[in-house]
């Protein structure tokens, strides 16, 4: 099917009353135009009727219930077929928030987003785990959440346990797993996908050194099979190895963009860190 097929193209906007904008070029798999995301911060959830009455008698102004916080502001970018796209920035810059917008976890407050192809988010791994169930049962449970049948997950189970080295713990309830075991199992299940558009959030830095090496190899396999990949990571060396383009975020705003080597080097220079 052509990339420009209407059945493969979806637009999301801040208002259904607005006409859809002119589509991006056919090779653009993800397109964002002026995308912003606003959160509300509630200051006093315990403001009572008594406090309201006292404020009225004393003619005091009631405290503000909430204030705006713009996590993303006017994000415009294009990710084309074949792109391996890295997002860099300090903690709190909006990197993971942007990835969650692309994963459709957060709808944008304004702007337009276009997708061509299925989106597979490798983020918040293990979010659907049940600690009372065994590792094997959680594989089936998470597989169902990813759209796999029980038979398909049973066929993948041996490979998952081989990859994680957790075969002897297959029948142990997940609540007895260490945090490292939990993360390894979650990563192995989440990476059993065949994506067109792959989103990865901080999946490269979990586990011991041997597992990190295996995880990077598996992700490289996913990169090869995906039409486009978006990666958020603090591992600048890994971003240089795996990506060709990228952007830098600061306080929800794009401040740099282009070839990933330039974006990473500029970022490291700005924080006075050695280049990798």
Image (spheres, rainbow, N blue to C red):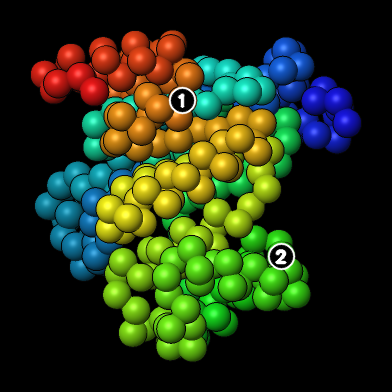
Q: Residues within 10 Å of mark 1 (few under 14, many from 20)?
A: many
The answer to whether residue 204 is visible is yes
Residue 232: image location, x then y, percent: 40, 36
Q: Residue at x 35, y 70 (%)?
A: 181
Mark 1 lies on residue: 243
Residue 76: image location, x then y, percent: 51, 17
Quadrant (top left, top right, bottom left, bottom right) of the C terminus:
top left
Residue 255: image location, x then y, percent: 34, 14
Q: CA distance from mark 1 to mark 2?
A: 29 Å
Query: Of circles 1 and 2, which is in front?
Result: 1
Quadrant (top left, top right, bottom left, bottom right) of the N terminus:
top right
Q: Residue at x 57, y 82 (%)?
A: 137
Q: Residue at x 17, y 54 (%)?
A: 55
Q: Is residue 52 above or below residue 142?
A: above
Mark 2 lies on residue: 148
In primary-sequence order, the first of circles 1 and 2 is 2
**Circle 2: element type:** loop
Q: Quadrant of residue 21?
A: top right
């Amino acid at each position: 099917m052509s990339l420009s097929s209407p059945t493969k193209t979806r637009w999301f906007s801040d208002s259904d009353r607005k006409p859809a904008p002119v589509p991006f070029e056919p090779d653009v798999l993800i397109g964002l135009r002026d995308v912003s995301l606003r959160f509300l911060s509630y200051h006093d959830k315990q403001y009572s009727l008594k406090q309201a009455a006292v404020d009225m008698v004393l003619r005091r102004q009631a405290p503000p219930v909430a204030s705006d916080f713009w996590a993303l502001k006017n994000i415009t970018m294009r990710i084309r077929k074949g792109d391996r796209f890295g997002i860099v920035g300090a903690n709190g810059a909006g990197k993971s928030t942007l990835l969650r917008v692309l994963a459709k976890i957060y709808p944008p407050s304004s702007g337009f987003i276009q997708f061509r192809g299925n989106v597979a988010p490798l983020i918040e791994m293990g979010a659907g785990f049940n600690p009372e169930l065994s590792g094997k049962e959680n594989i089936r449970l998470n597989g169902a959440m990813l759209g796999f049948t029980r038979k398909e997950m049973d066929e993948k189970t041996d490979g998952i346990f081989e990859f994680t080295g957790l075969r002897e713990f297959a029948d142990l309830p997940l609540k007895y797993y260490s945090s490292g075991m939990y993360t390894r199992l979650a990563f192995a299940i989440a990476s059993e996908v065949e994506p067109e558009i792959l989103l990865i959030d901080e999946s490269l830095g979990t586990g011991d050194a041997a597992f990190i090496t295996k995880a990077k190899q598996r992700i490289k396999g996913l990169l090869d099979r995906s039409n486009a990949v978006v990666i958020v990571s603090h591992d600048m060396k890994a971003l240089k190895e795996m990506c060709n383009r990228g952007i830098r975020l600061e306080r929800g705003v794009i401040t740099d963009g282009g070839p990933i080597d330039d974006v990473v080097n500029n970022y490291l220079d700005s924080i006075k860190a050695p280049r990798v």
